[in-house]
Image (cartoon, rainbow, N blue to C red):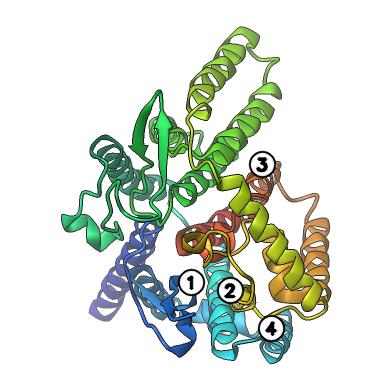
Amino acid sequence: MNHQTNKKKSNLIFFKIQNFFLYLFIFLLPTQFGRHFFFSFSYINGLRVDYLAPTLYLIDIIFFLIIIFNFRLVYSFFKQKKIIFLFLFLSLNILFSLSKPIAFYSILKVIQFLLIFYFFYKLKINYNFFLLSFLSITIIEVFLAFYQLKFGKSFDGFFYFLGERNFNLSTPGIAKTSFFGKELLRPYATFSHPNSLAGFYLLFYTFLLTNKNFERYFLLRNTLLFLSSVLIIFSFSKVAIISFLIINFIFYFQKIKSCRLCLLAKISVFFSISLIFLFAKGDPFTLEKRKELILNSLNIIKNFPLFGVGLGNYLFAQKDFSPSFPLFFNQPVHNIFLLLIAELGLLFFIFTLFFIINFFKKKAKKISSAIYYLITAIFLTGLFDHYWLTLKQNFILLAVIFGLTLKRS
């Protein structure tokens, strides 16, 4: 009897520790506290490039602890034939890469992405704790965003350990906007760019809005929807704001039969507030910069059409072009599709696209409509930015959101 009681107690403790790390992981999703390791391949023309530096983030350590407490899941993941096939497929990409260490590191990130997806697809999630974890960090994000917007500088202090970087309005290359004639610092919160912040919360907003599992948590859900909307709009990210409007319009238009006046009023409020922020003037050269990066990517695809330059190797190929905007040059093309084609090559890109389409076709009857809203959000923002593939917070959020959405289906 005592043996059984002790076993139950130890199992309960094990379960509580496991859950603690799981919801701590969720809390840390918008953060970027980590240690960069700069090697010879992390430099371009003598300049350190963060994108090329292997980085150990706090959230990686927490995920490693989650793995320890769920080792059986890890084993079941790696013994799948399609995962073994994927490893072979990715190994071919290393062979054709410009920098093999960077390609190998990028493949490790892909494996981590798939493991996170698999964990959130398989593990039992308490949605109340999930929302509470997300609400806790989102309140901090909103506080930091408004502080940075009002005072034109980072808060610093403790928030450094969540990934807030040190900056102010005079920092070279900082994102600024002119709003009704006043120059403002676009808020970063704990992200590396306001666009990344906006994209992150746009996807999370879409997930909450369309996932029926959260409807029972009325107060938590609506508080998070409101705070996410605030972060999207005050980011001054035009692409994210327009995508936000499109998703809301499609979602509420389908519900217009229930209460036309209520829904039309809600859509009008969204449009009125968002349009005010769309008139803010950002970088006057943003179109020229993006156009130059697109032309560079097309040239890279032309030079490496079949097998690409290797995962994570885009910037190595781009360094051979003469930049018109030096401070902006060590940036990937602001289009996830061109970036993928350049790194994977047309052959591997088509194969990957075919695999994804085939996956969704097989699950078409089981997949809820929520997945299509998520794909729309990624597609619209991915046409004009790269953060879904290159920045930690956005990349991991994709795995978590799709894992939970397919779990529900």
Instruction: Give the x, y percent position of residue 169.
Output: 30, 46
Residue under the image location 54 percent in, 58 percent down:
387
Residue that carries the numbered disc 1 in the rendered image? 51
Label 3 vs 2, first from the N-terminus: 2
Say whether residue 343 is left or right of residue 363: left
Give the quarter of the image for residue 293: bottom right
| Structural distance between the alpha carbons of marks 1 and 3 | 29 Å
- Which amino acid lies under the numbered mark 4 shown in the image of this protein? Leu
| Structural distance between the alpha carbons of marks 1 and 4 | 20 Å
Using the rendered image of the protein, determine whether residue 118 is visible from the camera's viewpoint.
yes
Front tag of 4 and 3? 4
Within 10 Å of the Cα at label 4, are there few (<14), some (14-19), or many (20+) other Cα atoms?
some
- Which amino acid lies under the numbered mark 1 shown in the image of this protein? Tyr
Residue under the image location 49 percent in, 77 percent down:
52
Front tag of 1 and 2? 2
Label 1 vs 4, first from the N-terminus: 1
**Placement of 105 over or under 190, stated as above or below:** below
For the residues bearing labels 1 and 2, Cβ distance under 8 angstroms: yes
In the depicted view, which residue is nearer to us: 49 or 228? 49
Say whether residue 184 is left or right of residue 81: left
Residue under the image location 63 percent in, 11 percent down:
259
Instruction: Give the x, y percent position of residue 227.
Output: 39, 35
Label 4 vs 3, first from the N-terminus: 4
Residue that carries the numbered disc 2 in the rendered image? 315
Residue that carries the numbered disc 4 in the rendered image? 90
Front tag of 1 and 3? 1
Residue that carries the numbered disc 3 in the rendered image? 373
| Structural distance between the alpha carbons of marks 3 and 2 | 31 Å
